[in-house]
Image: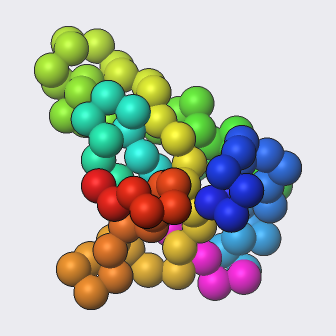
């Protein structure tokens, strides 16, 4: 997803990503530019669902609270084996950019 700087499709199925060791999906909110991780093992979708179809269900809590309605503008950035932390920061969205 990140290497070609394009859309997240085609993407692996949810079950395939988990079996490959990628337990988290990194998402970037276009409203407030925050990066967040979503645990793939708690997503309530069939394991055959492609990862790129999850993009339409992602909501930013901060932007939703601010606007008073579910705010659904996000980009899938990368599949990750670990959560975002101080020792493992967010992925670079474009070369040279770090939010």
Left or right of residue 90: residue 12: right
- Seen from the viewer's position, the closer of residues 3 and 24 is 3
- Residue at figure coordinates x 78%, y 70% from the top left: 16
The vertical placement of 74 against 47, above or below, is above
The image quadrant that residue 3 belongs to is bottom right
Q: Which residues lie in the magenta part? A: 20-24
Q: Can the viewer see residue 4 in this picture?
A: yes
Q: Can the viewer see residue 36 in this picture?
A: no
**Residue 49 among those drawn in magenta:** no
The vertical placement of 65 against 54, above or below, is above
> What x and y, as percent, mark residue 9?
79, 46
**Residue sitting farthest toward the left:** 66
- Residue at figure coordinates x 21%, y 14% from the top left: 67
- In the rendered image, which quarter contains the N terminus? bottom right
Left or right of residue 97: residue 54: right
**Residue 22 among those drawn in magenta:** yes
- Residue at figure coordinates x 47%, y 35% from the top left: 74
Q: What predominant SS class does the magenta segment belong to?
A: loop
- Residue at figure coordinates x 71%, y 70% from the top left: 17
Left or right of residue 47: residue 97: left
- Seen from the viewer's position, the closer of residues 15 and 60 is 60
> What x and y, as percent, mark residue 52?
70, 45
């Amino acid at each position: 997803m990140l290497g070609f700087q394009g859309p997240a499709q085609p993407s692996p199925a949810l079950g395939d990503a988990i079996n490959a060791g990628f337990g988290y999906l990194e998402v970037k909110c276009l409203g407030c530019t925050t990066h967040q991780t979503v645990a793939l093992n708690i997503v309530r979708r069939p394991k055959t669902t492609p990862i790129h179809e999850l993009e339409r269900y992602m909501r930013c809590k901060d932007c939703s609270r601010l606007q008073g309605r579910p705010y659904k503008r996000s980009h899938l950035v990368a599949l990750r084996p670990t959560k975002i932390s101080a020792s493992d920061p967010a992925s670079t969205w474009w070369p040279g950019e770090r939010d």
